[in-house]
């Protein structure tokens, strides 16, 4: 494959388009936050956890059983997801239940799923 196909043959900047897009650029902190979410979803075990929690609220033991992982491994992954506000937890007696933080997470996951499985 010729590497030249992926770039312009001449330098020709559309200044109007560049300025329109520049006005809509995101703040660096927002960009880092978005990149951090995608980084968190870059781990297959975390994706599996998100998929499970998109179905229903589960405790750490349930997730460990579903994923064939140790309790400590699941807890480690949940901490990473919680620190990015992708999941939340609630305690009921001695049991800690996890769920997705909000509907945005389900939407993000489903859009990724549609993109990957689209013919």
Image: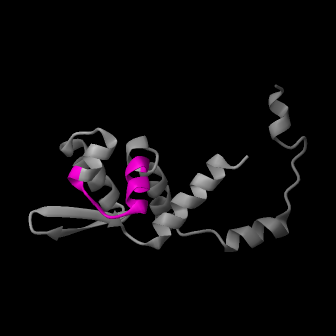
88 shown above or below 52: below
Q: In this view of the protein, which residue sits in the foreground, 1 or 54?
A: 54
Q: In which quarter of the image is residue 111?
A: bottom right
What is the magenta range? 47-61
Residue 105 percent across, percent down from the top left: 46, 65
On the picture, is 94 further left or further right than 89?
Answer: left
- Magenta highlight on residue 50: yes
On the picture, is 97 further left or further right than 11?
Answer: left
93 shown above or below 79: below
Which quarter of the rendered picture does the N terminus lie within? top right
Residue 7 percent across, percent down from the top left: 82, 41
On the picture, is 108 further left or further right than 60?
Answer: right
Which residue: 58% across, 69% down?
26
Report the label total: 0
Which residue: 86% across, 62% down?
14
Which residue: 68% across, 74% down?
23
Tell me which secondary structure the magenta stretch mostly adopts.
Answer: helix
- Magenta highlight on residue 111: no
Q: In this view of the protein, which residue sits in the foreground, 47 or 34?
A: 47
Which residue extends farthest left? 94
């Amino acid at each position: 494959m010729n590497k030249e196909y992926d770039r312009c043959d001449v330098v020709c900047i559309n200044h109007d388009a560049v300025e329109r897009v520049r006005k809509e650029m995101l703040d660096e902190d927002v960009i880092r936050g978005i990149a951090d979410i995608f980084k968190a979803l870059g781990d297959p075990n975390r994706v599996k956890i998100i998929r499970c929690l998109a179905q229903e609220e589960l405790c750490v033991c349930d997730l460990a059983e579903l994923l064939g992982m140790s309790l400590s491994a699941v807890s480690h992954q949940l901490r990473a997801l919680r620190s990015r506000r992708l999941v939340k937890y609630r305690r009921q007696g001695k049991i800690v239940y996890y769920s997705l933080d909000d509907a945005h997470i389900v939407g993000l996951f489903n859009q990724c799923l549609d993109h990957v499985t689209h013919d």
